[in-house]
Image: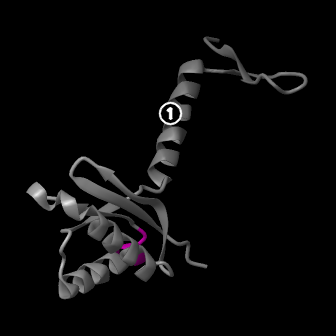
Amino acid sequence: MELDLVEISPNAKPPVCKIIDYKKFLYEQKKREKVLKAKAAKVVIKEIRFGPQTDEHDYEFKKKNALKFLQEGAKLKAFVFFKGRSIIFKEQGQILLLRLAQDLEEHGKVEQLPKLEGKRMIMFIAPKKVK
């Protein structure tokens, strides 16, 4: 009859087997996995870039955009980029990122505190779940 004996659940007592067409079984299994993968939530990461001496107005504008990104459900990657000798202002960059985290704390949760990587100080903020 061109059918195969396929073990469906090996851990059950007694093990469950079916007599089916194995190639059709594999095809349907791949199809199910593809549908599940399509339904999986995709993580979107939005970036906001600051300089170590970002002005108050620029900070407020970028904070407003960050708030919009978090409300849309995207993760936020905020970073301070140090050009040339501005690396001596590491403390200012860290203060700026911590201030942003404090301003956005009711909308997002800090996933990674500010950390210096090369010429960038990076911080991640994840959106809080809406109840």
Give the prevailing secondary structure in the magenta stretch.
helix
Q: Splitting the image into 4 quarters, where does residue 79 fall?
A: bottom left
Instruction: Name, please, the residue furthest toward the front.
Output: 88
- Where residue 126 sits in the image (x, y, percent)? 46, 65
Write the residue at 50% across / 29% down. 27
- Kindly indicate the quadrant of the structure image that contains residue 96: bottom left
In the image, 18 versus 126, the foreground residue is 126
Residue depicted at x 21% and y 52%:
119
The range drawn in magenta is 69-73
| Number of numbered callouts drawn | 1
**Residue 72 coordinates in the image, percent (x, y):** 39, 74
Instruction: Residue 8: name its quadrant.
Output: top right
In the drawing, does residue 28 fall left or right of residue 81? right
Q: Secondary structure at mark 1?
A: helix
Q: Decide which of 30, 127 is in the foreground and name it.
A: 127
Classify 1 as above or below 31. above
Above or below — where is 98 with respect to 113?
A: below
> Quick check: 71 above or below 88?
below
Position of 7 with respect to 115 (left or right) is right
